Image (tube, rainbow, N blue to C red):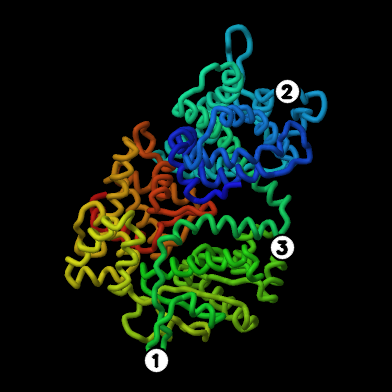
Amino acid sequence: MITETGELKNKLQDILSKILHGISDDIVIGECYDLYKKVIKFETEHNGDKQDGLKYKLDYINNIVTKKSDTTLADLNQFIGDFEVFVKKLYIILDEFSALADDSKIDYKGKDSHMGCGAYLNNMGKIKRPIGSQGESERLHKITNFDKKTQTQTELEELNENLNKATIDERSELEKRIKKLEGRYSDEKIGKYFLDSVVLKNYMSHQSEDPHFGEMFRRFQIIMVSELYLIYFFKSDLENGFKIKSSESELFNEYVERNIDKLKLKSEKYVPLNLKEIPSIDNKFNFLDEIFKKQHQFQIIGKGGNGKTTSIENLFLKCLNDYKKNQNNELPILIPLSSIKDVSSNIVSEIAKKLQVDNEDIINEMISQNNLILFLDGLNEINSSSIQTKIIQEIKDLIDLNIKLKIIITTRDDASSSQHAEIDYFNIPIYIIQLVKKEQIKDFVIKYCVNEEEAQKVLNTIEEQDERILKLFGKPLLLVRAIEIIKEDQQLPDNENDMINCFIEKLLIREKSEKKDPKINIDFYMYILAGVASELQLNNNMSNNPVTKIKFIQYIMSSAKKIGYNLISEDSMSSDYIIRIGCELEIIAQENKEIKFFHQNYFEFFLAYYMRNLIGHE
């Protein structure tokens, strides 16, 4: 089997996003593909219809998307023909997961075993079918598990509740989202792809001439759109079912694989930074992996954008790979502490959530046995002072009671002096992350350029800068953004704020020109996110803490209203659109149904942008 990487999911995103996001902006293609792989590999209790022979599809997808090897018409015929097998397998999995209503199920083991693909799709309530001589259409009922709410039902309830409290201007956007969710069960656009997928099987069997690659690729897209949409539609049912079916060990392995896949591409551009212990007698510098070999518990501090998160993410990835190779039995867990927002939550409950484990006693046992490596990122980013005090005490207890448990903590250090007593909460070694040295700049440039010629041009431009600009490059975040700007313009803004502004605007301009997306209005996009930063500042105590997607959408709606931007016009940027583009360009980040700005520095930039451009003009 070919191993999928982030590169494959990125390419799938490129070739399918226009179609799938035309159906729903809520579809996260990478997440759906991860779930798709589980469905393909899952062994059902019913072994008919060659369902367990679908694993070749993963190789075929990799081949045709990455073009790493030739694909033939025979391969395509099999891929298309097995759409019916895929649909039946998905139906059987949903049945095994008790996700289908008992009063309308197909008897696939007995009298209905002869039924074709269309019958299964109809039964799942996915498409409209023509009835009568006039060709009217009948909307088929929705298949749901009446004992529990689906994700869609939960979101609809939240939206309807907000609708009752909304102003007249806010109601239009909310009503539009409600209508979109309610209509998702029988979307005409996806119905067309389902019907095309069914028809293609018969068409291919009667075709005499081989189609050209472009036509083969179009047919491949039809099948992939149909199959991934089915995964998306039943996403919550599948996730819950797989969770129940999986053992703890499988859940841990899935967590490891998921995070390796998430961080692998990012790690290829990692440049190790120096750290210095404080107070330091010998003024000696060390890399993080060298410190980790000697210290079980320590704290990393540094200013915003200095590379704290990137550094521990890289060490986290190394530990994940060691665990996967069975080089140790210590499971690495990375917890962004900003995700702890409820006084009833704690580090143990966050670990259980990450691993999808219901019993916290399992986590406590792993801690007592020193079978975890805890990466606790962003102590300063906890929104509430009372919650922060509680978490600090919990970390102290973990350290005091488990002296061999490996714990690495990061926090922001905005002190201008060398006195750091105010963040020495735990009586463990503290290392301050050092600025990028001049000799390290070349390493960054090489990592972020496609060839030697481009790298040399960037280096030449950097060397032409005065000391004031070169000083800014001590922060990896600004250095990387500067490299991207130089690659296009060969010149740089002269301060940190303008550098971030230039980089974000270039991302949006590139998105608009390369994808020929007429919806993007760069000025309004910037103004709306600036307004969102202002709302976060008012409600989040100047912290870039994640909020629910519903709350983030409310902030977008409020910001758009203040500047007179119409979110519901057909040609306008909708709330979902703004979020999707922001996530794709890594301006904002979404994880576990919560959203925040991609980096604290971005949040601070947009807040400053709001104060500079919008105060007094709303």
The part of the image, by quadrant, that contains residue 199 is top right
Q: Which residue is mark 2?
A: 115
Residue 158 position in % (x across, y down): 55, 45
Q: Residue at x 28, y 68 (%)?
A: 473
Q: Which residue is mark 1?
A: 282
Q: Which residue is mark 3?
A: 359
Residue 447 position in % (x across, y down): 36, 61
* 1 or 2: tag closer to the N-terminus: 2
Classify mark 2: residues with Cα within 10 Å, few (<14), some (14-19) or many (20+).
few
The part of the image, by quadrant, that contains residue 182 is top right
Q: Amino acid at mark 2?
A: Met
Q: Nearer the viewer, mark 1 or mark 2?
A: 1
- For label 3, the SS is loop
Inspect this view and state whether residue 575 appears: yes
Residue 424 position in % (x across, y down): 47, 84
Q: CA distance from mark 1 to mark 2?
A: 77 Å
* 3 or 2: tag closer to the N-terminus: 2
Q: Residue at x 58, y 8 (%)?
A: 134
Q: Nearer the viewer, mark 3 or mark 2?
A: 2
Residue 531 position in % (x across, y down): 34, 52
Q: Amino acid at mark 3?
A: Asn
Q: Residue at x 29, y 56 (%)?
A: 484
* 3 or 1: tag closer to the N-terminus: 1
Q: Is residue 523 above or below residue 440?
A: above
Q: Of 553 and 311, which appears nearest the observer?
A: 311
